[in-house]
């Protein structure tokens, strides 16, 4: 039985067998208490050992912190405090010994230290809780969209288009290295795909093609960005959820984003109670109250222009000065959500200069129908927009920005043949996990973080 199941059971006095890793082993003259954990939940199972019944006393010396063991015995109501049931051991079997240099001893380790032992950190309370919550959130994402009738779309990971026009992509090639040092330039016709190819930065453009075929779609996959950002919110490899809806405008897009985020929060609060208690107590005090109040209240919604006015009005001195036209920095985003509104804020209608080419131009000719969701503690967690659905407008944006029209022929076709208003957004999955758990560094909410100069394990 898994420990999660055992701790829930009401039927004591039954024989059980349980396997896990020793967390602690308190030994006295006549008996011993071993706490074991199998990762199924935060709690350990207490094993009571009456030394007289053990035929092999050596197992107690070998059941050290980190060792893997099997315990056979009777489940009984626990006379001690802290647990409702415990196991009275009849037999202990050592599955794998754990020598003394095991780095995870009883004391609490720093997240920095644990990052260096990424292959073992999953055995700590914090990191096993993170990965369980992450798994529940992943399930909630699919549940939300499937219940709404969205079609799950697997968009390509290798791509020949640069969706965001940002140009910070990892290249995929089979050409020999010396090719890249040659003065003659690189002949991509000899490369695997016969052209330059990269890892995707977003599945959006491919999602748009299917949204204009089957209606509402969503993708949930890995995305890659070769930006040299060493921050607590950037990864080179992260996971993104991108819904795309036909016959939908920017306001429908915001409604879906808000409903979606609240659904995930509710799901976690309901299904990950024990792990969330842990985060509330040890990682981010008060996070439970905060999330519980967010699911009950409406997100604030303001235009970019109003956001700039709020920032200027505050009189606060920011590292990056505020004027109309700047891209909001994370200090601005956090100020709006943490200080001004004290909850998530949706900012929309950004200047076209700071947003991607595909966003729909407003009638003012200056702003586009972009919307970002900003969360307390994080800043931007969602970026989305209504897409430009006019063929002529899109062509002129592509030309204005000096992009190659031929590269976007297929994308333009969507506007040529039965165009529809459509909209979507991308949620950075790891940023959402940070928001939910209160973990301050994005490297700590993905099992194996990829960041500049760091690709271990
Ligand atoms: O705002 P972004 O760049 O939007 C897009 O990629 C659109 N194509 C999405 C769409 O409309 N379908 O990225 C979306 C989100 C951000 O809000 C952020 O949460 C996350 O992806 N994100 C990152 N997360 C971790 N590390 C990075 N380097 C990230 N870059 C973006
Ligand atoms: Mg963005």
Image (cartoon, helix red, strand yellow):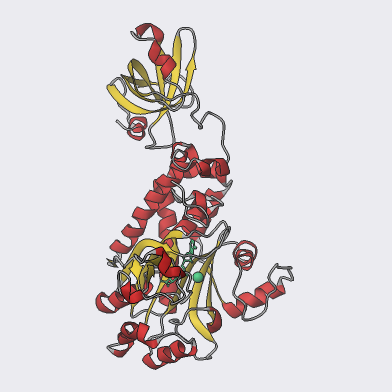
x, y percent for residue 266: 42, 54
Q: Nearer the viewer, residue 128 or 269?
A: 128
On screen, residue 266 above or below 212: above
The answer to whether 171 appears left or right of 320 in the picture is: left
Residue at x 46%, y 82% (from the top left corner): 357
Q: Nearer the viewer, residue 71 or 289?
A: 71
Residue 201 in sight: no
Q: Nearer the viewer, residue 428 or 455?
A: 455
The answer to whether 442 appears left or right of 306 in the picture is: left
Residue at x 44%, y 11% (from the top left corner): 31
Q: Quadrant of the N terminus?
A: top left
Q: Residue furthest left?
A: 214
Residue 140 in sight: yes
On screen, residue 428 above or below 420: above
x, y percent for residue 405: 39, 87
Q: Nearer the viewer, residue 101 or 5?
A: 101
x, y percent for residue 248: 37, 79
Q: Quadrant of residue 281?
A: top right
On screen, residue 398 above or below 137: below
x, y percent for residue 305: 60, 80
Picture mark count: 0
Residue at x 52%, y 57% (from the top left corner): 452
The answer to whether 339 appears left or right of 249 in the picture is: right
């Amino acid at each position: 039985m898994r420990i999660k199941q055992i701790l829930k059971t009401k039927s004591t006095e039954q024989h059980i067998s349980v396997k896990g890793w020793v967390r602690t082993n308190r030994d006295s003259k006549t008996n011993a208490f071993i706490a074991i954990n199998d990762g199924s939940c935060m709690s350990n199972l207490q094993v009571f050992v009456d030394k007289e019944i053990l035929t092999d006393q050596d197992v107690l010396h070998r059941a050290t912190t980190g060792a893997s063991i099997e315990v056979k015995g009777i489940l009984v109501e626990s006379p001690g405090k802290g647990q409702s049931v415990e196991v009275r051991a009849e037999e202990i079997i050592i599955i794998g010994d754990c020598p003394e240099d095991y780095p995870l001893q009883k004391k609490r380790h720093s997240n920095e230290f644990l990052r260096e032992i990424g292959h073992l950190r999953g055995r700590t309370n914090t990191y096993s809780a993170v990965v369980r919550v992450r798994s529940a959130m992943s399930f909630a994402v699919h549940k939300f969209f499937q219940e709404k009738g969205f079609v799950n779309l697997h968009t390509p990971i290798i791509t020949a288009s640069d969706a965001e026009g940002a140009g910070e992509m990892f290249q995929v090639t089979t050409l020999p290295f010396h090719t890249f040092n040659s003065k003659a330039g690189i002949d991509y016709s000899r490369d695997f795909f016969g052209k330059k190819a990269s890892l995707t930065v977003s599945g959006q453009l491919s999602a748009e093609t299917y949204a204009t075929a089957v209606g509402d779609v969503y993708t949930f996959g890995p995305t890659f960005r070769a930006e040299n950002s060493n921050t607590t919110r950037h990864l080179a490899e992260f996971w993104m959820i991108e819904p795309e809806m036909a016959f939908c405008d920017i306001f429908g897009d915001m409604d879906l984003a808000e409903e979606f985020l609240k659904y995930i929060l509710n799901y976690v609060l309901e299904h990950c109670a024990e792990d969330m208690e842990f985060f509330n107590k040890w990682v981010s005090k008060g996070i439970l109250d905060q999330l519980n109040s967010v699911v009950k209240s409406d997100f604030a919604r303001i235009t970019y222009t109003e956001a700039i006015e709020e920032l200027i009005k505050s009189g606060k001195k920011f590292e990056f000065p505020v004027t109309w036209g700047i891209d909001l920095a994370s200090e601005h985003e956090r100020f709006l959500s943490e200080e001004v509104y004290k909850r998530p804020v949706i900012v929309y209608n950004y200047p076209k200069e700071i947003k991607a080419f595909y966003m729909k131009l407003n009638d003012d000719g200056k702003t586009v129908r972009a919307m970002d969701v900003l969360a307390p503690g994080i800043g931007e967690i969602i970026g989305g927009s209504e897409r430009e659905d006019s063929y002529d407008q899109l062509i002129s944006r592509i030309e204005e920005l000096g992009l190659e029209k031929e590269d976007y022929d297929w994308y333009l076709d969507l506007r040529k043949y039965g165009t529809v208003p459509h909209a979507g957004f991308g949620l950075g999955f790891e940023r959402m996990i940070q928001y939910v758990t209160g973990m301050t560094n994005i490297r700590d909410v993905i099992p194996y973080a990829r960041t500049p100069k760091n690709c271990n394990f």
